[in-house]
Amino acid sequence: MKLSEELKWRGFWNQTTFQDPEILDGEKRTIYLGADPSADSLHIGHLSVYMMVRRFLDHGHKVVLLVGGGTGMIGDMRDTEERDLLSAQKVAQNTEALKAQVSKLFAGQDFEVVNNADWLSKIELIPFLRDIGKNFSMTDLTSREFFKSRIDNGSGLSFAEFTYTLLQGYDFWYLHKNKDVSLQIGGSDQWGNLLSGVNLIRKKEGVEAFAMTAPLLINRSTGRKFGKSESGALWLDASKTSPFKLYQFLLNSDDQSVFEYLKILTTLSKDEIEDIERQHSGNQHLRIAQKALAKNVVEIVHGKEVANNVVSATEVLFGGKDLETLKPEEIKILKTEIPIISKNKTISEILIELKLSKSKGEAKRLIAANSISFNGVKVLEDIKISQSGLLKKGKNSFILVD
């Protein structure tokens, strides 16, 4: 299918400065997507927009991925309050981390990574105000939603923060001049900033550039967007959110959300997703769609080997797979995700030590209620565990005895 058709089918098509689908389906373009280094990792909300950009690569367009080492010194505007400024050293560290992360995310694809500090740091104030500032209307800027929200809630905003949209507009103009970029992509919360670049290019160059946004990825179970400011953010950095935790979160997607996520977050084709939907519809208890989603996303973010290891470790916990069949790398995943305790202790001693039971009597009642198993076999008495294995209480409490 054409790029415009695919973007609409997947749910990426949101705001655009154009109506004609030939803007996307005609000549090949150079597009760009930016991210500011307000943290040292992207999160799954970012991933949704990066996967939109992946569709452009698949259709033969060129891609520039920008990391905002310059704009990150100011920080993008928020609806609620001004961001705390990061130190120059922290911005530089975060910038390098994001450059490495996007490079890994798009490994094997034809793209370029740039840092806007390379040109923004060379701007001189008076020439910038004359050549760039004169092209922006205060009437237009103060009519934008972010400005209204901040004024309405009484927090206001600083001049430095207010100039962020001028700098992002300058980025688009600079990349248009130097990289032939003609289309900027972002999340829907970036719409005003994208328009700044479109308008600046029109005024300074007399040509039309374009912008389009994707809807923000929503956690349907909470009704809130996925982001770093939300509690329990899902980071793409394995040291902040482990591949196992990312897999488990996606595995627990509800049926209302899972097909939306499959279209947005995975590399699976329309035919593959529709086939998964047919298999899933008659066997919802098998969570076929959720498993496909979780494995594909972990594979995109962390690689095929890590994804396979996470799947194997999960099958030991929830799928009845024998612990002894796991490879050392898969055992290592379990050791970082569930409690480990030494053997040669009774079951009641283990449960009490890990605060899974308050007393020996309670532990024995759990055993009598068939709530305890070891290596997949129900335990009938308070025995001493003298070998390595997996102890399980109920459906979701696991202990690795080693």
Image (cartoon, rainbow, N blue to C red):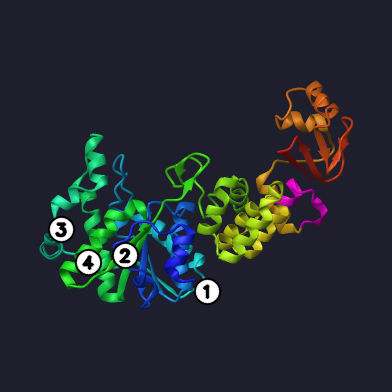
Disc 1: which residue: 108
Q: Gap in Å between the C-alphas at discs 1 and 2?
A: 32 Å
Tag 4 and tag 1, C-beta contact below 8 Å:
no
Disc 3: which residue: 136
Q: Residues within 10 Å of mark 1 (few under 14, many from 20)?
A: few
Please indicate, yes or no, whether residue 23 appears anywhere in the rendered image: yes
Q: Looking at the figure, which quarter contains the C terminus?
A: top right
Mark 3 or 1, nearer chain start:
1
> Which residue does the image show at 49% across and 68% down from the upper left?
106
Which circle, 2 or 3, is nearer the viewer? 2
Q: Which residues are magenta?
A: 314-326
Tag 2 and tag 3, C-beta contact below 8 Å:
no
Tag 4: amino acid:
Lys
Asked where in the image residue 389 lies, by quadrant, the reply is top right
Q: Residues within 10 Å of mark 3 (few under 14, many from 20)?
A: some
Mark 4 or 1, nearer chain start:
1
Which circle, 3 or 1, is nearer the viewer? 3
Q: Residues within 10 Å of mark 2 (few under 14, many from 20)?
A: few
Residue 352 falls within the magenta-colored stretch: no
Q: Gap in Å between the C-alphas at discs 3 and 1?
A: 39 Å
Disc 2: which residue: 19
Q: Gap in Å between the C-alphas at discs 2 and 4?
A: 37 Å
> Which residue does the image show at 43% across and 73% down from the upper left?
111
